[in-house]
Image: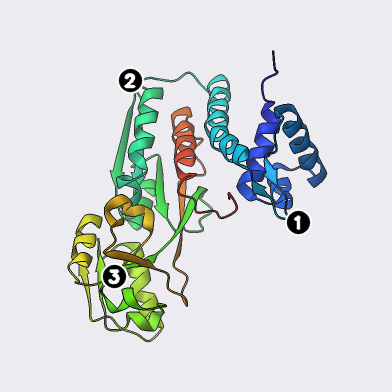
Amino acid sequence: MKEPIDSRQLQIFFTLAKTGNLSDAAKELGITNSAISHSIHVLEESLGTKLFHRPGKVLILSEQGHYLAKEATSILTHMYNIRSVLAGPILDDHTTLRVAVGYNFMSRPLPDVMREWQQCFPKATLAAQAAERDACLNLLKNDSVDGAILVDPPEDASLEQVPLFEDSLRVLVSSENSLGRAESVTMRSLHQKVLLVSRMHSHTTQKVLSEIRRRGFSLRDCVEVGSGQAITEMIKAGNGFALVPEWTLGTDADEGSLVWKTIEDADFTRKWAYIRKASAPPSFMSRTFLRLCQRVCEELNASPRLV
């Protein structure tokens, strides 16, 4: 009978797959580069397969490495949760975990997290409240929620933040629009165009409008339409363009009549994080919620290193 995979070797492999770099993985794990290389070699020997291709100094996951990296996410999460149960206080099944969540996250990844969390705590309640970024912060600081998932978290010593993933705003436009037909899109290309947004006063919308003004350009109009689906329908009708990350629209934007464009002279990268008060130790339910969020966000984290 073959031995099970060593958990430490699995953790080292997963960290290396995530970072794509020996030095970064060594720094995260607090061990040496040679220790990582040795561990990966032993793991590959025990599995009888190559997990990485190594053209030069580049590390690229093999097909078997891709499979193991995907499986390792749930395996390690489950192991961490077991440790938390054994080390944590007795759980009150009827406890409520309160979280404030950005609108984008509430509509797409959160339902999967809530479903798995409820399976872990069938008698407990996960009360999720959708809110704008600043409102999420205020709810947390006023002790109205136990944690919050929001975009571009502030640097605040009173808050502990755990990065979840990064995304980038891209231009979504009709293929018949001049922007859609252009070989390249720049900030100047947006001048005197109509921008479609879900919520006018959101942190992201205000960030975009501020950058457009800072560059010395202006929009013909900025129209609040309320939802991602409404944005795609308006764009199909030729009524403007949107600046959104691809994951927020799901399959709504997977039609040939719409095209995605990257703004070549601007970086609209956003950082998503889970934050909580640094002074309040997280409960077991809160730690489990975070682990589930991290697992779901692995698919959203557009890291070219996992290739």
Q: Residue furthest bottom?
A: 216
Question: What distance separates the C-alpha of mark 1 from that of mark 2?
Answer: 53 Å
- The amino acid pointed to by label 3 is Ser
Residue 56: give its label: 1
Question: What distance separates the C-alpha of mark 1 from that of mark 3?
Answer: 40 Å
Residue 165 visible? The answer is yes
Residue 175: give its label: 3
Q: Position of residue 282 (x, y in %)?
A: 49, 35
Query: Quarter of the image holding residue 145?
Result: top left
Q: Residues within 10 Å of mark 3 (few under 14, many from 20)?
A: some
Dot in front, 2 or 3: 3
Q: Residues within 10 Å of mark 2 (few under 14, many from 20)?
A: few
Q: Nearer the viewer, residue 90 or 56?
A: 56
Residue 138 visible? The answer is no
Query: Quarter of the image holding residue 213?
Result: bottom left
Q: Earlier in the sequence, mark 1 or mark 2?
A: 1
Q: Secondary structure at mark 1?
A: loop
Q: Nearer the viewer, residue 41 or 91?
A: 41
Question: What distance separates the C-alpha of mark 2 from that of mark 3?
Answer: 50 Å
Dot in front, 1 or 2: 1
| Residue hosting label 2 | 123
Q: Is residue 86 left or right of residue 288?
A: right
